[in-house]
Amino acid sequence: MKKDRKKRRSESGIALLIAIFVLLLISVVAIALLVSSGTETALGTNYRTSSTVYYAAMAGLEEARGRLLPKNPQYFGASIISPTTTFPLGQTLYVINRLPGDNIVPWDPSNTYYDYEYQTEFGTPASGASYQSQPSVWDNNVQNIPGPIYKWVRINAATEQSIFTQVNASGSYSNSPALFFDPAHVNSSGNPWPSVVVGPTSTSVQALEITSLAELPNGTKKVLQYLAAPVTVNLTFPAALILDGYSDVFSSPNHASWVVQGSSDGGDSACSPSGPVPYPVYAVGVPDHPDVTNVINGIPTSPNETGNFTGTGSTPSIAQVTLSPNLQNVQGLNQISQTIMQSADAVLPGGTNETNLPSAMSSSNPMTIAVQGDFTFGAASTPTGYGLLLVTGNFMYASGSNWNGIVLVIGKGTMTTIENGAGGTFNGAVLIAQTLDSSGNLLAGPHPGPGTFNDTLSGSVGRGFVYNCAWIQQAQTSLTYKVLSFHEIRQ
């Protein structure tokens, strides 16, 4: 019995130890949860701060990119920067976005928001560059609604040194000449290979750097940068009507009032900045000499319409012409078509007509319209269109309809007149090219197939096709500014 009591006394207190251990374990878990909760809160705060400043900088990039377009109501203006002119090296355009009380002078070394990145890129201080400045659309919150809180955006010409890339593999980073983006560039095998190139080419557009700084009151900042270039179709038209193929088919309306004029009523003299176009302009142009005869054979002789085809050269003014490289092969033409599709103001399905065109399109607001398939222009009315029209299927247009700008029938490559009204005119230029087979697949050969223009009129006709350089230029205003690269610059 004594031994039993002694044994029980030796085990006393074990419950207390277990309780203390459990309490200690719970305390450790609780402390870990508190630490974890604090860490999560800190991470959430940091993420929120980082996201806020990131999207503020992105807003600056997008505002500047949008305002580079002439069609934007807040366009900077051609006197400041234009898609059709080269932005000078050593010059900057700053977009300033001040909150109330802010003093933002990015070219002043003593300013809180001085542009240190400029010297990193170009080797010279921002204070030494020639600068222009424009207020942001949000500057000083004039709209009285919350806006993005970025500080400034810089726009400048890009060079090898500024993007730290040896574009031409010369062995060094050059600060001159400026960089350009060539959508018609080809690789060593002759295949399309759109690329950044050093210096301008006949089909290139200038590449611009767009750099945005956003900074929060707590000092958190981000600098983001685009390399961007204007998207244009960049086409020249040596004729009012171009049948861009081989074994082209042409049938002219049998009517004395229908004309094809390569020399317009002054329209060919409206090209800026130098006046008349610097190359011959014919009534009809074809890339293959035998097709000159095909077109002439499609002109009625009773009444004799040969005198209605006017322009450079003899009458009728029909000639073999040399087209730009991106118009000479199926791949290049398809690239043009895809570029327009991706950047168009409106993309319409096949089988539609003019009632689906945007109501906002006007002479002061020409638009880019892409139709994925067949399109009838003038089925229910005698409309007038403005800008650039791409039709990948059969394009049927009414005799009373009008278009001012460029019409590209690239795909099935067939254009047909239908009767509805009279006197309609296409002012600008028209190009017809077959790049698709009957199944809708790209042609296998390098050259486009026969372009086809058919007349089905028996009564009233339109005036015809009249070359007009001013409308051609308006139709080729930049579709958008394409982002070639995007990155964050570490601070």
Image (cartoon, rainbow, N blue to C red):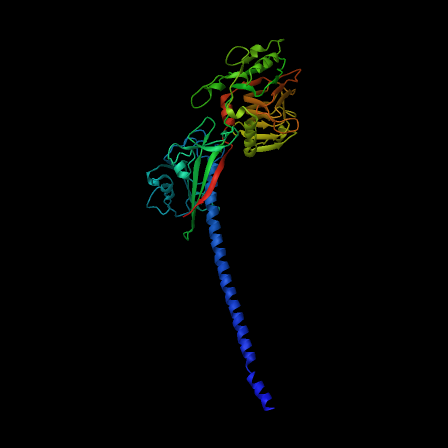
Which residue lies most toward the bottom here? 2
Residue 18 vertical placement versus 268 (above, below): below
Quadrant in which residue 420 is drawn: top right
Q: Residue at x 49, y 53 (%)?
A: 47
Quadrant in which residue 12 is drawn: bottom right
Foreground of the two, 216 or 175 = 175
Foreground of the two, 283 or 168 = 168
Q: In x, y percent, where is residue 463?
A: 58, 17
Lateral position of residue 401 relative to residue 66, left or right: right
Q: Residue at x 55, y 84 (%)?
A: 10
Lateral position of residue 17 relative to residue 119, left or right: right
| One can see residue 134 in this view | no
Q: In x, y percent, where is residue 59?
A: 48, 43
Q: In x, y percent, where is residue 264?
A: 51, 17
Residue 419 vertical placement versus 17 (above, below): above
**The N terminus sits in image quarter:** bottom right
Q: Residue at x 45, y 27 (%)?
A: 201
Count of numbered badges drawn on the protein: 0
Q: In x, y percent, where is residue 327?
A: 53, 24
| One can see residue 486 in this view | yes
Residue 426 vertical placement versus 232 (above, below): above
